[in-house]
Image (cartoon, rainbow, N blue to C red):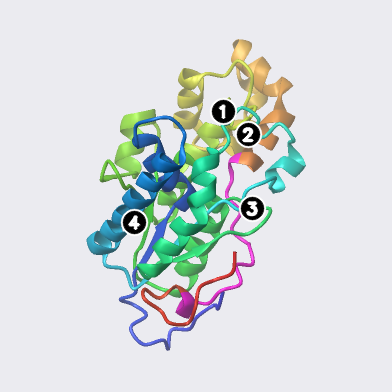
Amino acid sequence: MYPALEGIEGWTTMKLLMADGSSLVRQIYEAVPGPDCIQRARDAQRSARSSFSRALDEHAPTHAIAPFDFGGNTWRHDIYPQYRANRKPIPEPLKEVLPEIRRDIEALGIATLAIPGVEGDDLVGTIFHRWREVFRGPAVILSGDKDIATLAAHGALVRHHFQRAARDNEWCMSRYGIPISALADYLALLGDDIDGVPGVPGIGEKTAKKWMNRYGSIDRLLQDRNNLPGHAGRQLRAHLAELELSRQLISLKTDIECGLTWKQIRVGSSAGHPPG
């Protein structure tokens, strides 16, 4: 992706919209009643087209892209084979129509992208940070994923598309009792059974919340680890390797070579769509 220049006309008024494609489409499918079948997937396809169209109308971006999971193993499986072992696979009927759903989204003027070996979340993180390096305009991210919500700490405007609610510091304080700047480390401490993130055994929400409010980050927590009392302190000191692994699994990669230009994700661009 080009590290675009200040000389680009209107660079201060640009607005990026990113939709967490795989997550949003899966939520739409799950909201359609009935057994897994091709008709349910077709109904989800129609709903997805309407939902992405609404997103364009509501946010009026100059640039828009919907990153998707490519499928299969990723760099996270390379460092931890049990990653996502407990997550249900995408239903086969939805998997069958997914290429058509992506074409529908592209027909609206929203580019789509999927790259082998990485998750759509990583593409969101990469594109967001490159946008911030180049443009002064806002970056809106539509996702209910708590991992993507961590980007709000870096200036992203993260919104739950279906609840039409912000995932910001106020939401984080209300939901978890911590500032959003500490959310990624909080999640790493707890782990995630569905995604297969180990976390620190024996550390629950209450302890993770207390530590993040006191220290603000895992780095500062670890500086004082030898002074942490009781069972929780012993667990932390005994499971430093699991904690570091969890931090890696929770973190979004932000250095992926996406193979596209800003022109290609301009809304309604005739420059073609990115590969994948």
Q: Quadrant of the N terminus?
A: bottom right
The picture quadrant where one finds residue 88 is: top right
* Residue underneath mark 4: 49
Give the structural element (helix, strand or loop) at label 1: loop
Q: Residue furthest left?
A: 58
Q: Which of 238 and 144 is in front in this view?
A: 144
- Residue in the picture at 31% in, 68% down: 61
The span from disc 3 to disc 4 (Cα, nearest Å) is 25 Å
The span from disc 3 to disc 1 (Cα, nearest Å) is 18 Å
Is residue 233 visible in the rendered structure shown here?
yes
Q: Which residue type carries mark 3?
A: Val
* Callout 2 touching callout 1 (CB < 8 Å): yes
**Is residue 132 rendered magenta in the image?**
no
- Residue in the picture at 48% in, 31% down: 212
Give the structural element (helix, strand or loop) at label 3: loop
Q: Quadrant of the C terminus?
A: bottom right
Observer-side mark, 4 or 1, equals 4
Q: Where is residue 167 in the image (x, y as percent from the top left)?
A: 34, 44
* Residue underneath mark 1: 194
Of the numbered discs in the image, which one, if any, rests on residue 118?
3
* Residue underneath mark 2: 84
Task: First in sequence, mark 2 or 1: give its number.
Answer: 2
Of the numbered discs in the image, which one, if any, rests on residue 95?
none
The residue carrying pointer 1 sits among few (fewer than 14), some (14 to 19) or many (20 or more) residues within 10 Å by Cα, namely: few
Is residue 177 visible in the rendered structure shown here?
no
The magenta segment: 250-264
